[in-house]
Image (cartoon, rainbow, N blue to C red):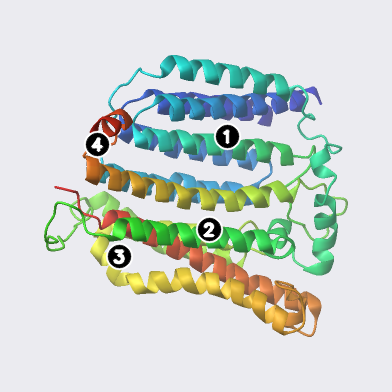
């Protein structure tokens, strides 16, 4: 099954590229909301890597079907970790956005360099 | 066929990510993140992660987008172009990307059943779930019982983040000396089509949320997904009818009760297990038959997770939506 192998590499390359695209936004953008968007892209890339690792060839979603013998299941553990991480991700993102809203109210801007100038 | 589809989705994912970072219009960046999440959910589904796909679709494409839009309404919807640190960023990102792509050649190939990740505890979980829990969804079994400690921790993180948002946004806006009378936010009352379509689908969204909650042991679903789906239904109601109407339907104290009650329910089940002679979160002592005891414990803690997630997401949404713009 050469195709699946190639797809695996492609998955990991996409993970690497999306991760670095997120990191680029965090480093280079001065806008705080843009930084948070970059952080959530970064986070999604990590999710993609975990879920790529859980795939088993010929496997199916880890839900046992009655009356079917010798089923191959994909690994349930990374799925559990990522499932909870997604929900935690949105709550921490909201916390970050709340801080950005307060920064906007105190400084009148959400551009990092303007905030540093104002201090 | 699935190969071509997967490559197509992954390429779209990269293009969307680059477009998000390149645009200076924050509104379109947020809309693109919604599309990004939907593509990601489809990818998860191809990789056999049905539960994760459901969560990502409800949270990433639904709740996150609304919270981002609320934050944009309070701040700015355009970013100023800034080229200061571009060279450093390109350097760091280029080196990191090439290192990681180099490292991928050492990873076990996709779908290899002998990969180290499939050798550790996962086979034990798959083997023991029918015997210990007697229900089909292994993900729910691992989430709520085998790794119940992790999930308890995650629920408390959601709880803490929700409290944090309420603390940060709960204080009055500086500069507005006296709080302006609460304006009636009208929502999309004057738009006929969203109104009619929304009215039609909101009951079904909430019904589907309840189904994922109570069917989580048998199919993809569980407390995390259900809480998020029900929250999106109520947020849609708030967008259509105005935020104050949604607060009338589900008042703030009910939301706080859900957040606190859900977390307490989860922890409380653990303590009851201890009082009944088992370990913390060892549900088998809850009933005379250990299997039924575990099922009972899982149903209760999934309900707690659902309540906390739904209450926390809605409280966060209301905290953003009800804040007035600083003058």
On residue A45, which mark appears? 1
Q: Which residue is mark 2?
A: B157
**Quarter of the image that includes the N terminus of chain B:** top right
Secondary element at tag 1: helix
Q: CA distance from mark 2 to mark 4?
A: 29 Å
Q: Nearer the viewer, mark 2 or mark 3?
A: 2
Give the chain of mark 3. B
On the image, the x and y values in percent for residue B82 come to: 32, 21
Q: CA distance from mark 2 to mark 1?
A: 21 Å
On residue B246, which mark appears? 3
Q: Which residue is mark 4?
A: A109
Q: Nearer the viewer, mark 2 or mark 1?
A: 2
Does residue B128 appear to the left or right of B110 in the view shown? right
Q: Nearer the viewer, mark 1 or mark 4?
A: 4
Determine crowd level at label 3: few under 14, some 14-19, many 20+ residues with C-alpha closer than 10 A.
some
Same subunit: marks 3 and 4: no
Position of A21 relative to B232 (above/below): above
Secondary element at tag 4: loop
Does residue B213 appear to the left or right of A49 in the view shown? left
Q: CA distance from mark 3 to mark 4?
A: 31 Å
Secondary element at tag 3: helix
Residue for point 14% across, 51% down = B175
Determine crowd level at label 2: few under 14, some 14-19, many 20+ residues with C-alpha closer than 10 A.
some
Q: CA distance from mark 1 to mark 4?
A: 29 Å
């Amino acid at each position: 099954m050469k195709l699946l192998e190639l797809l695996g590499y492609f998955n990991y390359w996409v993970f690497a590229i999306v991760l670095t695209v997120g990191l680029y936004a965090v480093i280079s953008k001065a806008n705080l909301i843009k930084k948070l968007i970059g952080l959530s892209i970064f986070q999604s890339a990590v999710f993609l890597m975990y879920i790529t690792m859980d795939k088993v060839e010929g496997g199916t979603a880890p839900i046992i079907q009655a009356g079917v013998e010798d089923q191959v299941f994909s690994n349930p553990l990374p799925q559990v970790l990522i499932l909870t991480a997604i929900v935690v991700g949105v709550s921490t993102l909201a916390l970050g956005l709340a801080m950005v809203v307060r920064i906007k109210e105190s400084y009148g801007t959400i551009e990092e360099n303007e905030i540093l100038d104002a201090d | 066929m699935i190969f071509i589809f997967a490559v197509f989705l992954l390429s779209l994912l990269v293009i969307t990510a680059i477009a998000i970072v390149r645009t200076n219009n924050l509104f379109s960046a947020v809309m693109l993140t919604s599309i990004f999440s939907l593509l990601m959910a489809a990818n998860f589904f191809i990789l056999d992660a049905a539960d994760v796909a459901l969560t990502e679709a409800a949270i990433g494409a639904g709740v996150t987008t609304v919270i981002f839009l609320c934050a944009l309404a309070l701040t700015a919807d355009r970013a100023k172009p800034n080229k200061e640190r571009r060279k450093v960023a390109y350097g760091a990102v280029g080196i990191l990307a090439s290192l990681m792509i180099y490292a991928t050649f050492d990873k076990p190939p996709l779908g290899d059943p002998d990969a180290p990740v499939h050798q550790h505890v996962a086979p034990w979980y798959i083997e023991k779930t029918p015997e210990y829990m007697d229900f089909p969804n292994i993900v729910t079994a691992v989430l709520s019982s085998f790794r119940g400690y992790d999930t308890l921790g995650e629920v408390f993180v959601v709880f803490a983040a929700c409290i944090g948002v309420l603390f940060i946004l709960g204080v009055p806006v500086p500069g507005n000396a006296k709080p302006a009378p609460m304006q009636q936010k009208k929502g999309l009352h004057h738009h006929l089509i969203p109104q009619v379509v929304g009215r039609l689908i909101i009951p079904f969204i909430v019904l589907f949320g309840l189904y994922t909650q109570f069917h989580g042991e048998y199919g993809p679903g569980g407390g995390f997904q259900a809480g998020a789906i029900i929250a999106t239904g109520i947020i849609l109601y708030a967008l259509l009818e105005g935020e104050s109407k949604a607060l009338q339907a589900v008042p703030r104290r009910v939301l706080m009760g859900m957040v606190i009650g859900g977390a307490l329910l989860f922890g409380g089940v653990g303590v009851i297990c201890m009082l009944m002679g088992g370990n913390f979160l060892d549900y088998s002592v809850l009933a005379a038959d250990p299997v039924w005891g575990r099922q009972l414990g899982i149903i209760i803690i999934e309900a707690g997770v659902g309540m906390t997630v739904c209450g926390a997401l809605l409280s966060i949404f209301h905290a953003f939506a009800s804040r007035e713009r600083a003058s």
